[in-house]
Image (tube, rainbow, N blue to C red):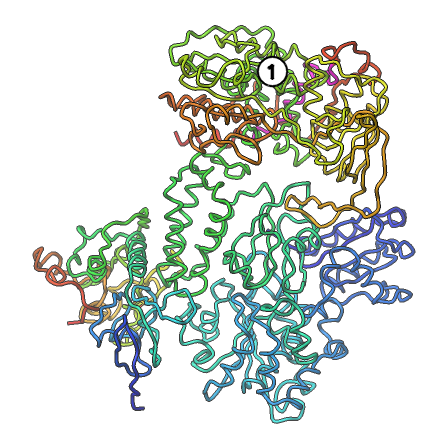
Amino acid sequence: MATARLRVLICTGKVCEKKGASAVESALISRLVQFGLNDEIKVSTAKDCVGYCKQAPVMMIYPDNILYGKVKVEDVEEIVEEHFLKGRPVKRLIDDSLDAKDVIDNMRKSNFFKGQELRIVMENAGVINPESIDEYIGRDGYLALGKAVTEMKPEEVVDEITRSGLRGRGGGGFPTGVKWGFVAKAEGEKKYVVCNADEGDPGAFMDRNILEGDPHRIIEAMAIAGYAIGSDHGVVYCRAEYPLAIERIELAVVQAKEMGLLGDNVFETDFSFDIELRVGAGAFVCGEETALLRSIEGKRGQPTPKPPFPAISGLWGMPTLINNVETFANICPIIRKGADWFASIGTEKSRGTKVFALAGRIRNTGIVEVPMGTTLREIIFEIGGGIPDGKQFKAAQTGGPSGGCIPREHLDIPMEYDSLKEIGSMMGSGGLVVMDEDTCMVDVAKFFMEFCVSESCGKCPPCRVGTKQLYDIVDRITKGEGVIEDLEKLEELSEMMKQMSLCGLGQSAPNPILSTIRFFRNEYEDHILRKKCKSGVCQALFTSPCENACPCNVDAAGYVQLAAEGKFYEALELHRERNPLPAICGRVCHHPCMDKCRRGQTDESINIRAIKRYISNFEKELTVKPITPTKEKVAIVGTGPAGLTIAYFLAKKGYDVTIFESMPYPGGTLRFGIPAYRLPREVIDQEVKLITDLGVRIVYGVRVGLNISLDRLQELGYKAVCIAIGARVSYLLGVNGEHLAGVMGGMDFLNKVNIGFPIQVKGKRVIVVGGGNTAMDAARTALRMGAKEVRVLYRRLKEDMPALKEEIEEGINEGIKFTFLVNPVEAIGEDGHVVKMKCVRMRLGSYDDTGRRKTSVIENSEFVLDVDLVIPAIGQEPETNFAEVEKNILIDPKYRTFVVDEETHMTNIPGIFAAGDDSTGPAMAADAIGDGQVVAGAIDRYLGGDGVLWEKRKEIIPTDSYNDDNYVETRKEFEQYVLPIEERFNNSTIEDFVEVERGFSRDQIIEEARHCLHCDRASLSCTNEDI
Amino acid sequence: MKKEKITITVDGKEVAAYAGETILDAAKRAGIYIPTLCHHPLLSNTGACRMCVVKIEGTGRQNLNSSCTTPVNDGMVVTTESPEIKKMRRLNLELIFSERNHQCPFCEKSGNCELQAVAYRLGMDYVRFPFLWPKKEVDASHPDIIHDANRCMLCGRCVRSSEEVDKKGVFAIKGRGIDSDVTVNIDGRLGDTEVTKDDVAIQICPTGSLCEKGLAYSERYGERRFDMKPIEGPVEPK
Ligand code: FES
């Protein structure tokens, strides 16, 4: 969770690159390493020209907002030593032909700065030399103190702060002015002002930034506070881990005293104020104010109960004002510019700005200052640049270990005290950790609990023992040893800790647990009930990341290793243990396994799908023995991937399985939705044959709901009936004219073509609307059928298209035209047939929950395209009417899917199940197979079985034939032979579409498989030891 | 300073109190029992054990306050017992019992133990959390005293008595969080100190952690102190 103090951006646009930007970059990086600064200072490059070519190469320093021009390798040393280490920007590199303001303004046009134009707390950060009091004074420094002590009464100062609406930035958000008022009114022979600079949240370093970059600001503010409450003594309590901050505060105090701005008779008035510095040992609990005070007194840093509050009885029993660094950093501008100015910023209940430390899975990490009420979405996607590597945003944690997580659904939450509290998180000191899809929320809760266990002071049992028990429970859950009652226990214990713990640490420690349970209960349930960590984090729950990512749980690491050894039959058998359709999946699977392959983090993911495809070639020689059914009769409706999977597993378990198929051929969506150039028909037939060889019967040409009723099936003695007919009804566009002849839904088009229904495409202009796989399939099919032109319209950009990347690329190669950022609005007909399509252009707007940008229509941007055939492929739904009509089976009114019980996977009618697209909604073939497994298990349990379909592999597959060390570093090109474009179109009939991808050779496959890093071995060897 | 008399409401009853005294003291005078463990009338209060928590109405805060440390205010409205509070106190006891070895049948303090007695009075008869049972030293170096850290609940009474009453300052708490421990003269042995069995520190240990030697199982079951009467408040020194 390392985050950077400074970010250096080097432009590597064309001009800068020519003038040596890369050399500067590598010189800088080696300097930083040399000084050990490489963790705190992050260097990145901007490939897009930043627009200062005449100064090339340029380097920008954030958050200091400094732009250096004409940087040479020799300048790097000075930049590192003067600027990065001592905080003194190198003036000679700042070109004065560019007005400084201009430069900064220009930089602010980048999104990173656009969101944070207004800076209060960090107004001087990076602009002044923090070791020069003159520069501070030059930026209106000590003006506020002068104004306070010479022009204002103490009550007026308190009043000004109260009216400003400033709230404590350290955590709870108590109104600062009210606190000042309490201490001002409290009686005591002496009073103290304490600055809490014991910033301890993991990932938070805002206070450090302020102390190091602008120390006088804190000193001045503390003196103002002293004047307001009647104190002459201030203490800065700073953690020892911040030596530079300590040094700078000390220096600033000396400088201020020399100038009469601190010490006796400040500004020649009667007011005197002195500041001492205390260094804390860095226990997290010392950030709690009472513990902090005890620590200053030289006692054990343990909290004491409140009341009495420090305002009444604090340091040495005297009235004490404690504020944190960021709170103090707001004081001077308020006094200078007035409460009304400050109150005009932010939201009604949270005024001013807030500094956040952006960390975690986000492009721009670092410190940002934004007005209160800025939404989380703006901070993450606009200022933070979104999530790197095309991953999905999952949650953001605010408030560190005391806070909670905020899920996708709440991205629009305004970042202010009360909204955060409502959602079960808190502002805290401003840590903001972003998590993506690869983060397991149970693991996150465990991480924060671990922190709390080690930071609990141990004084009271709710925190001392409570954090430990919470940690142990969560730890067991991540190991797959949790029980469902644990959730209730976690919640009950958390609630008790919140109410009974002595101090804020214990009271807020359960927040990460409560909020992850609240928003990600399903992840806890996955770990507990299904022993599954979908994010692939909790090692104990899976053997390898690829297996874990596979919707059908195929032991990919296992068959890849067998393939590496050349044991292709064994590999095939291992595959078929969990998935009977390797040849099909080897061609059309969307291979989530490859996205999680650890090899991909170093060079390229192992091409698991190609290996699968190769081993499936050996199916031809496979024979299976029929299994004589000993158990009940089961009927399955549909021979798609889900139906075939269920039949396979149930037949293996001894059930008497019959599949009813309305078409004359098997395969369902595989055959009628996917074109033959991607999935040759004989591949389907061959895999179906292996299933029927087991003893499964397929009855063709019978449409359940038309030729036979569900009732009748049950009467015939089928003890369980499962509907798996897929989703074949295309969504409509919802525009005028879509019922004209020549407008045909994507799935509808593919079905008709693949059945052999004569559709005239030859010589026609075809428009396909949509960006998914169905759209690509329809477009490429139309091209093969002789269309004159095929154009795909998509309302976003190419990179947003949900279709498989390789499909899009092949489509482009074959000559499909794309028009992005458009949307059809009307189909215009002549004599009942479509002739034109009216479209509008779209613009990209703010980000949606998936991190893609929303689109909106550009006014007056209509244009018209000539067209003969329009294929809207924007989604489809299952045709479930018959079941609703016949048996009142519950159907989801929106998605038209069956409503099934989460546990039993049964519809509301006993004995009737639904699987694949019919229960999950339209998804990938592998998802349908995965759902088929779940339903097969559920049907087995329903009929009295144990529901277990396979055993987990326990042994390591050894490496015998090669030395895997030789494959760690090197990586060979791995390109498959694809059919040349010219040869793709000389088909005569649909069934003859020639397969485009032609697979790999034996040697290529073995070579590729040998690069596997064997992630499965770690977990397998530890379970072996356990036994 | 003369004590100013004020009125507070405790569990719906008006109760007379002195300004500055704790809610616990005011409640006790009014005959209202609030369970305590770390509190002792001879000692300062630290609010460590959280058993005595009560709800102060109208503060807008959701957390409970320890009544042994919270001073009364005029007009204060306090709830000392509700099903919710009772449940949480029981849960707190479960945590304390789960932390170390508090197996009453095998403890010589049984029947005279405050922790056990409070658990009985609150109906905490079952611990739903796994026992952590760290292995701790037993210090039998003293001729008259046994110090068994396995039975300690870290209330800190011995620390405070030794400092405030016995004026010896022998005990202290070391370590942090779940690793906290009572230590004798910083990792020393009790036998090497001037502690005697008559020290208040030894006499008011609320668990079987500090015991006088020679008294083990000297009273019969049924005749032990808390067999006869539920606990009313902290044990007194001899
Ligand atoms: S906290 Fe009051 S008795 Fe322990």
Q: Is residue A911 magenta?
A: no
Q: Position of residue A154 (x, y in %)?
A: 58, 87
Residue at 18% x, 71% y is B236
Residue at 59% x, 63% y is A416
Q: Position of residue A147 (x, y in %)?
A: 68, 86
* Above-or-below relation of B202 to A366: below
Q: Quadrant of residue A438?
A: top right
Q: Magenta residues, as a range?
A: A995-1015
Image label count: 1
Q: Position of residue A130 (x, y in %)?
A: 71, 71
Judging depth in this view, the residue of A447 and B207 nearest the camera is A447
Amino acid type indicated by mark 1: Gly
Q: Is mark 1 within 8 Å of ligand 1?
A: no
For the question of whether residue A612 can be seen, the reply is no
Q: Is residue A998 magenta?
A: yes
Q: Which residue is mark 1?
A: A667
* Above-or-below relation of A437 to A313: above
Circle 1 — which element?
loop
Judging depth in this view, the residue of A916 and A124 nearest the camera is A916
Q: Residues within 10 Å of mark 1 (few under 14, many from 20)?
A: many
- Quadrant the C terminus of chain A occupies: top left
* Above-or-below relation of A765 to A797: above
* Above-or-below relation of A525 to A511: above
Q: Position of residue A670 (x, y in %)?
A: 63, 19
Judging depth in this view, the residue of A302 and A673 nearest the camera is A673
Residue at 53% x, 34% y is A892
Chain letter of the residue beneath label 1 in the structure image = A
Ligand 1 shows up in the quarter that is bottom left
- Residue found farthest to the front: A831
For the question of whether residue A721 can be seen, the reply is yes
